[in-house]
Amino acid sequence: MQSENQFIDLPVLTEKNITLALKREDLIHPVISGNKYRKLKYNLLYAKEEGFRTLLSFGGAFSNHILAVAAAGNENSFETIGIIRGEELQQKLGLNPTLSRARNLGMQLKFISRDHYRRKGDTDFIEALKKEFGDFYIIPEGGTNGLAIKGCEEILTEGDKQYDVVTTCVGTGGTIAGIINSSSSHQEIIGFSALKGGFLSDEIRTMTTGDNWKLKTNYHFGGYAKVSETLVDFINNFKTETRIPLDPIYTGKMLFGLLDMIKNDNFAPGTRILAIHTGGLQGIAGMNRVLKKKNLPLLDI
Ligand SMILES: *Cc1c(COP(=O)(O)O)cnc(C)c1O
């Protein structure tokens, strides 16, 4: 399955003579949007081949990945279990659009404390889960493993070789690793980190041997899932001007950063850029609840 590249028309692009297209991976599936679809594809095939009937994964309150696993399980006849960070969410499940949608898709949710959640990689922790739920296929938090990277290698197509620069959002780094693997050496891949902290470059290096990439770490707006009025205004204006919705955790921050770099002449005139819209739009509803509580302007729906 391939998604369409859509050319963006904005005054700054004309002024700086930059071509920018967005690869609409957000439109690839009605619920399993963007890179989460790519990351699950080969994991689902493997789990089926190996005879697993249940998928288990981990995530937080807004997790695009948790909802993607719930929807993919529902579509492919797997039982699904979500181990969720934060015991306090259990009482407020009805107020959380991501988690209530996951539950409506049949996912069994288990809420655990943040301390407990940190131990999710430990053998005794997994053994206890097996006692509770029976056998399952584990998909790591954020969905990144070797099969996920293989799926993300299918994001770029032959036709995309015409682009000089490809940009994507970075959480765990699995998506950018797949993109780097299938890119051409003449292309530069730029990742925009959605989290604070410099450890991500090392993580990416463990997943790919390509060296035609760099990571921008100054557009996270204070850290993972942190938002500001500036970011909300940017996302709302971008939607008004292009009719393309962006999410506040990943793609909004990437486009903000990319247009800022273009404004500041980080790219030579004539550069052709392809930005991957990795999806995540389901998170807007949950973020609006947070913004409302803080009396900040809301994201347009
Ligand atoms: C999960 C996610 C990412 C991050 O992908 P990684 O492979 O973890 O780096 C980027 N964008 C969106 C919309 C996501 O849901």
Image (cartoon, helix red, strand yellow):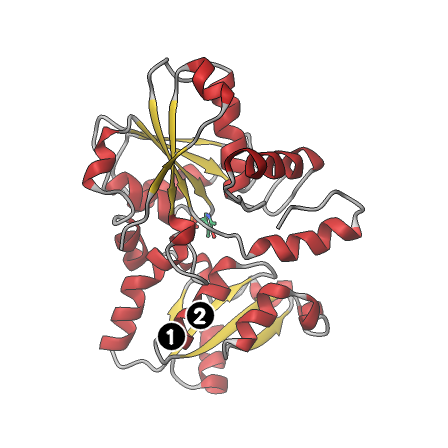
Mark number for residue 75? 1
**At which x and y percent is residue 225?**
61, 47
Residue at x 65% of width, y 52% of height: 287
Residue at x 25% of width, y 39% of height: 209
**At which x and y percent is residue 5?**
34, 40
Give the residue type at disc 1: Glu
Does residue 222 sit above or below 139 in this rendering? above
Q: Is mark 1 on a helix, strand or loop?
A: helix
Residue at x 37% of width, y 14% of height: 268
Left-right relation of 64 to 164: right
Give the residue type at disc 2: Ala
Q: Is mark 2 on a helix, strand or loop?
A: helix
Q: Residue tagged by mark 2?
A: 71
Task: Identify the image quadrant of residue 135.
Answer: bottom left
Residue at x 62% of width, y 71% of height: 112
Mark 2 is surrounded, within 10 Å at the Cα level, by few (under 14), some (14 to 19) or many (20 or more) other residues, namely many
Q: Marks 2 and 1, Cα distance to the nearest angstrom?
A: 6 Å
Mark number for residue 119? none
